[in-house]
Amino acid sequence: MERLIAALSSSFPGESGTVIGPDAVLIVDDGGHGPVTPTRMQGRARVIGGLRELMAAGTTPTLASINGSHGITLARDGRVVGVITVQVGGGMLSTIWVVSNPEKLRHWNAG
């Protein structure tokens, strides 16, 4: 997760190939409110492109517990705008799930 945070924070330098598998899949649940189209993409280059779109200016990734597992929150202007969970295969990220649907993030921003 730390390597993914580093890649997200630096717009994916050349070393991102050691983090994201060549056949990785990115699945985004944005509820129709996000910048990523399509919401399912496959292949390292497309996954990196989709993740770059999610990292709008001022977005900060942070380690978090998401549904009892290690994950990442994406915050902007003090509000959580996305959560990321992953599946690892062969030492690389094989599936990345992102929830950026504002309806599903309400509890992250309550209070």
Image (cartoon, grey):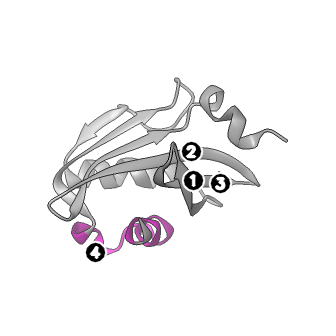
Do labels 1 and 2 touch, CB within 8 Å? yes
Instruction: Name the residue type under label 4.
Output: Gly
Q: Which residue is mark 1?
A: 73
Q: Mark 4 or mark 2, which has the lower sequence index?
A: 4
User: Helix or strand or loop: what does disc 3 sit on?
Assistant: strand
Who's the residue at 22% across and 62% down the image?
92
Q: Alpha-carbon neighbours of circle 4 within 10 Å: few (<14), some, or many (≥20)?
A: few
Does residue 107 appear to the left or right of 59 in the view shown? right
Magenta residues?
3-18
Who's the residue at 50% across and 69% down the image?
9
Up/down of 37 relative to 58, above or below: above
User: Helix or strand or loop: what does disc 1 sit on?
Assistant: strand
Q: Quadrant of residue 13?
A: bottom left
Instruction: Name the residue type under label 1.
Output: Thr
Instruction: Name the residue type under label 3.
Output: Ala
Q: Which residue is mark 4?
A: 14
Do labels 4 and 3 touch, CB within 8 Å? no
Quote the CA–CA distance across marks 1 and 2. Answer: 6 Å
Instruction: Name the residue type under label 2.
Output: Gly
Q: Which residue is mark 3?
A: 75
Majority SS type along the magenta span: helix
Quote the CA–CA distance across marks 3 and 2. Answer: 7 Å
Quote the CA–CA distance across marks 1 and 4. Answer: 23 Å
Q: Mark 3 or mark 2, which has the lower sequence index?
A: 3
Residue 20 placement (x, y as % from top left): 25, 60
Of labels 4 and 3, the one closer to you = 3
Of labels 4 and 2, the one closer to you = 2
Do labels 1 and 3 touch, CB within 8 Å? yes
Quote the CA–CA distance across marks 4 and 2. Answer: 24 Å
Q: Quadrant of residue 81?
A: top right
